[in-house]
Image (spheres, grey):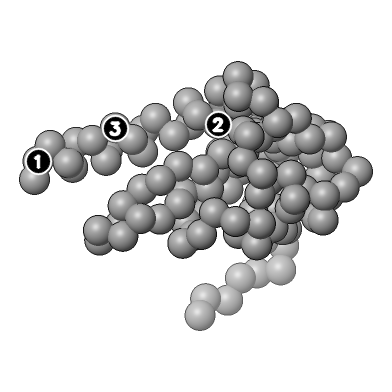
């Protein structure tokens, strides 16, 4: 492993832009080696990708794992979480961050949906080559 100077890690963390107070969460189906996986993505209000996670499932445990990882990685708590109508988000949200406002609406989550577009374009291009 590489040795990191003590001041370097904290300096890089300080320079990282702070995420906005509104987070948009979404998941999309992708195929990896012929198997269906779920690509979970979190985007802040400015469109910056906060975290990406690939999982086999799309249930409450998977959503809970994504929330915890997101909170740990960003070292901040959002004011509002915007998701689609997937019920797993609500169940995991009540456990992990109950004091954060949760908005679950089809039209509000366009920021996260737009973040998936490059992934879908690459997938489409790979499909047409085969």
Res 112 label: 2
Which of marks 1 and 3 precedes in the sequence? Answer: 3
Q: Residues within 10 Å of mark 3 (few under 14, many from 20)?
A: few
Q: Is residue 93 left or right of residue 47?
A: right
Q: Residue at x 65, y 69 (%)?
A: 5
Q: Position of residue 22 (x, y in %)?
A: 74, 30
Q: Name the foreground residue: 96 vs 75.
A: 96
Q: Compared with residue 14, is residue 24 higher up or lower down, i.e. above or below?
A: above
Q: Are marks 3 and 1 in contact (CB under 8 Å)?
A: no
Count of numbered circles in the view: 3
Q: Percent x, y for residue 83?
A: 65, 35
- Outermost right residue: 99
Q: Label 3, label 2: how many angstroms apart (C-alpha)? A: 15 Å
- The answer to which quarter of the image holds residue 80 is top right
> Badge 2 local density, few (<14 within 10 Å), some, or many (20+)?
many
Identify the residue position indicated by label 3 in the image: 121
Mark 1 residue element: helix
What residue is pinned by disc 1? 129
| Residue 79 spot, x, y in % from top left | 83, 34
Determine whether, in the image, residue 95 is placed left or right of residue 44. right
Distance between the Cα atoms at labels 3 and 1? 13 Å
- For label 1, the crowd category at 10 Å Cα-Cα, with few meaning under 14, some 14 to 19 and many 20 or more, is few
Mark 3 or 2 closer to N-term?
2
Q: Residue at x 25, y 61 (%)?
A: 33
Q: Position of residue 102 (x, y in %)?
A: 79, 35
Between residue 10 and residue 91, name the one nearer to us.
91
User: Which mark sits nearer the N-terminus, 2 or 1?
Assistant: 2
Q: Are marks 2 and 1 in contact (CB under 8 Å)?
A: no
Q: Secondary structure at mark 3?
A: helix
């Amino acid at each position: 492993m590489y040795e990191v100077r003590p001041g370097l890690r904290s300096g890089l963390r300080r320079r990282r832009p702070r995420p906005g107070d509104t987070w948009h969460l979404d998941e999309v189906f992708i195929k990896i080696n012929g198997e269906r996986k779920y690509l979970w993505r979190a985007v802040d209000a400015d469109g910056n990708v906060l975290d990406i996670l690939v999982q086999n499932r799309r249930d409450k445990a998977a959503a809970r794992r994504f929330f915890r990882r997101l909170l740990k990685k960003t070292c901040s708590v959002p004011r509002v979480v915007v998701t689609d109508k997937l019920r797993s988000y609500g169940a995991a949200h009540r456990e992990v961050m109950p004091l954060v406002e949760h908005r679950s609406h089809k039209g509000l989550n366009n920021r996260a949906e737009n973040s998936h577009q490059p992934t879908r374009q690459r997938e489409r291009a790979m499909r047409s080559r085969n």
